[in-house]
Each structure stands twice: as structure tokens, then as C-alpha cells.
Amino acid sequence: MAGPIRREGAVAPSWSWLDVKAHFEIHQTRSWLARPLLLRKYQIVSEATFNEIQRVEGGEREVDARKLRAWLDVAKEKSKEQLLLDQMESKRAR
């Protein structure tokens, strides 16, 4: 990847493709790329939160209301982002 840069005599960072990908994802501002990344992050948080909704006390399982509300909040935000992404993609397809 850095070959053409070095042939021109310029200094190229010796980054792996994962470092380049991470750098691009952090600094890009294109919403068509940012939304899917945000959705993936919401999914990770949603799964982690959902797995902690139940708590066991004294051998009995019960739903932790605070964690359930947190999961519902994440699910709501994820749904909004998914809707926005779907709308963007339908406009791009026209």
C-alpha cells in the first residue's frame, strides 16, 4: 500500500491495514459509512446489556428494571439509526 508513496520519495507510515481502517473510521464524516458503524456498536451494547437484564438473588431470577430500561433505550436509538440508514439507502438507490 505504501509502495507508490515511497517510490515518490515521501515518507509513508508503516500502518497495518487494520490501523488504516480504524484511522479512516475515526476521521471519516460520511453518514452512509458512519451509520452502519454506529449500528454495529449499538448492537454490541445491546447484546451486552440484554445479557445482564436478569439477576439472581437467593436462587430466584428477576428482571433488573434499571438494566431493562437501559436496554430499551439502546434498542430505541438503534432503531432510529436503522431507520435513518434505510432512508438514506433508498434515496441513494433512486
Image: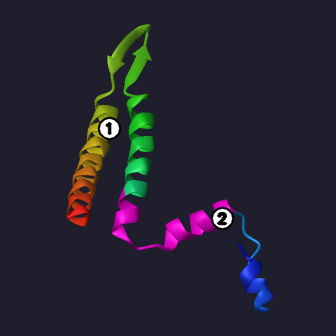
Specify whether 61 is left or right of 18.
left
Q: Tell which tag, 1 or 2, sits nearer the viewer.
A: 2
| Image quadrant occupied by the N terminus | bottom right
Q: Residue 14: give its label.
A: none
Q: Judge by depth and name the residue closer to the eye, 4 or 70.
A: 4
- For this orientation, the residue located farthest to the front is 94
Badge 1 or badge 2: first in the primary sequence: 2
Estimate how packed mark 2 is, as few (under 14), some (14 to 19) or many (20 or more) residues with alpha carbons within 10 Å: few
What kind of residue is marked 1?
Trp
8 vs 55, nearest the viewer: 8
Residue furthest to the top in view is 59
Q: Residue 53, located in which quarter of the rendered image?
A: top left
What is the magenta range?
17-35
Q: Is residue 30 magenta?
A: yes
Q: Is residue 39 above or below residue 28?
A: above
Relative to 91, is 6 above or below?
below
Residue 47 is situated, as x and y percent measured from the top left of the image, at 42, 35
Give me the disc on residue 71: 1
| Residue assigned mark 2 | 19
* Relative horizontal placement of residue 58, taking residue 23 as reference (left or right): left
7 left or right of 69 in image: right
The residues bearing labels 1 and 2 have C-alpha atoms spaced at a distance of 31 Å
Q: Is residue 11 magenta?
A: no
Which residue occupies 43% across, 28% down? Answer: 51
Question: How many numbered marks are there?
Answer: 2
